[in-house]
Amino acid sequence: MKSQTITLVLLLLLVFTNTISASDTAVDGIYYNFDDATLTAKVTYRGAEDDWMYDSTGDLAYVGHLVIPASVTYNGKVYTVVGLDTDALINSKKLLTLSLPATVTSIGTGVFTLCNALQSITVDDANPALLSYDGLLYYRGNPLTLGVVPRGKTGTLELPDGLVEIPSGKFQKSSIESVIIPNSVTTIKDGAFCECKLLVDITIGNQVHTIERSAFMNDTALQVVQLPASMRTIGASAFLGCFNLTYLTIKEGLTTIKGSAFSGCSSLCGIYLPSTLGSIGNMAFYNCFNLATVMNNSTLDIQLGSATHGYVAYYATEIIRSAARLDQANSSNAVDAYCTNEGIVVSNFNHQPLYIYNIIGECIYSETGIASQTKKIPISKAGIYIVKIGNFSKKLILKK
């Protein structure tokens, strides 16, 4: 038994030894593996005497702002820098930014492991294989593929047009506060934005048809979600635990809400079930304690206090049947709201109550019984606002 254990340990060490790519050769503080046959070089980390495993602070790895050159001279020879080797930047806990030249076209596995402070990656525009957009790294191709999300990325993030899907877990536990998803995206994969504790707002493009399992699970700061008319399926646990989610807009076209999709969304106070909706999974709205109003335009038999159809009406105080669409998109006199430099403009709301809320749910403007067709409401502060006029609601992002 002892000999088997020793053999296993030796095999594991052999596997590890075959995967590391450390080097003792540094030029201007950057370590390289050189290939004399092709006169190419790949960036790596320093050799075994300063192995990353024993560096708890990250001081022995790359720190600050790292600029990779297109070529490097060593022992009288000029080498083209073509890639980042396996684990090249591993444990670079104090690395803040990374700049890549046009010549670097390959990224090895494990390169960004433990680079938790990395805020942005930039790539030379002439690079044929890689590109950067808003600090993220992408692989060129048709379609465009999201490669690396720096773990230290914060603030508002805009994803580029041409991206078709947001891969599984790419933003998990990131510190972004707002994300704009382009119209080219059709699928948000499982766990894509899971555990993003600072994410307050998402803008979902008008071609997204599927949000997969746990995509936004436990995004506890998320307050506003407006799903596009293209949406067909909301996956299991997609918004589970988003207990600050207050405004949810669902449009005609949605067919499936899977189990636990909105479980624990305790700030949600109303829900619209479109005529296209065919199924609500088990416990989809479990522990949505404040879900008082259900507007049911589906063929599902929704009953007050019932645990069927995912607890959607278990906590409700009223169920409203209406053939009218919330967005009234097919009406030539549809209610509408939009932003200008001065504030918000609303139209076609004859004699209906008008309310405007800020992102934390405070009513900043209200008016009832107005006869005018159009009204301009001056607002001085940039931010995210919700306009509610009767059954109509719309999220607006006011920029100054």
Image (tube, rainbow, N blue to C red):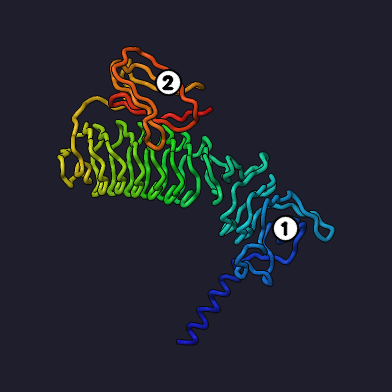
What residue is disc 2 on?
A: 377
Q: Nearer the viewer, mark 1 or mark 2?
A: 2
Vertical placement of 196 versus 114: above or below?
above
Question: Percent from the top left, x then y, of residue 243?
Answer: 34, 46
Does residue 238 appear in the picture of this structure? no
Q: Which quadrant of the figure has residue 257?
A: top left
Does residue 100 appear in the picture of this structure? yes
Vertical placement of 40 versus 162: above or below?
below
Vertical placement of 65 versus 343: above or below?
below
Q: Is residue 82 left or right of residue 256?
A: right
Q: Residue furthest right?
A: 76
Q: Is residue 153 left or right of residue 247?
A: right
x 58%, y 40%: residue: 133
Q: Is residue 379 left or right of residue 66?
A: left
Q: Residues within 10 Å of mark 2 (few under 14, many from 20)?
A: some
Question: Percent from the top left, x then y, of residue 1?
Answer: 45, 87
Element on which disc 1 rests: strand
Q: Residue furthest bottom?
A: 2
Q: Could you tell me the amino acid type at mark 1? A: Ile
Question: Percent from the top left, x then y, of residue 283?
Answer: 24, 49
Q: Which mark is residue 98?
A: none
What residue is disc 1 on?
A: 30
Q: Could you tell me the amino acid type at mark 2? A: Ile
* Between discs 1 and 2, the one toward the N terminus: 1
x 67%, y 65%: residue: 22
Question: Percent from the top left, x then y, of residue 314?
Answer: 19, 44
x 80%, y 59%: residue: 74
Element on which disc 2 rests: strand
The span from disc 1 to disc 2 (Cα, nearest Å) is 57 Å
